[in-house]
Amino acid sequence: MVKIYEFLIKSNLLSTLKANETKSIYNELKKLPESYKIVGENKLKNITGVDFIVIGSTGIFAIKINILDGPIAYNGKELTRWKLPFEKNILKSTATSVYSLQNLLKPKLKENCIVEPVLVFSNFKTKMAFGLNPVENIFIIQKKLLLKLIQERPTIYDEFKINKIAQILEL
């Protein structure tokens, strides 16, 4: 398995796969109502490890895309794939990205804001059983649950606040 991953990195196929999946997730996010704002990684200067940020009436969502397949589980400490821990602690890196985003927004909004971290596995062959229940405060979902997660949360922001947050992030 590691040799295949190393081959993908060396042959640049991993970049191509990630780009295709990023486009696929973006196309899914475009199905949200126009009141939701989508900020892509190319506009995020001080935030790393986040592919998209979605701002809407239901909150702020920091979305990180993973393209791997296979069974994904949680062993009480970290995520596993095929019962083996990921090479990098993916939960910790996702949480770190969210803290960076919260720290960027807090002084400009002059208030604390909750950013919901979302780890999306875009490969349809990925199997997991988390549903819409967070693990260590991170939503770990398949692509097919992304819109449901974003849209079916309680309303917390009005149009003014959504636009203000979007403006801060796009600077």
Image: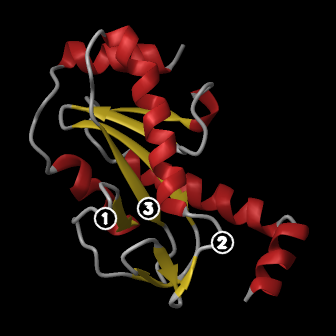
Position of residue 61 measured from the top left corner of the image (x, y, whole percent): 35, 41
- Mark toward the start of the polypeptide (3 vs 1): 3
Q: Which residue is mark 1?
A: 135
Please tell me whether mark 3 sits on a helix, a strand or a loop: strand
Q: Give the quadrant of residue 87.
A: bottom right
Tag 3: amino acid: Val
Tag 2: amino acid: Glu
Position of residue 114 measured from the top left corner of the image (x, y, whole percent): 27, 34
Q: Is residue 55 left or right of residue 20?
A: left
Disc 3 versus disc 1: distance between alpha carbons?
13 Å
Classed neighbour count for the residue bearing mark 2: other residues with Cα under 10 Å, few (<14), some (14–19), many (≥20): few
- Mark toward the start of the polypeptide (3 vs 2): 2
Please tell me whether mark 1 sits on a helix, a strand or a loop: loop
Q: Residue at x 46, y 71 (%)?
A: 78
Above or below 39: residue 167 = above
Q: Which residue is mark 2?
A: 87
Tag 1: amino acid: Val
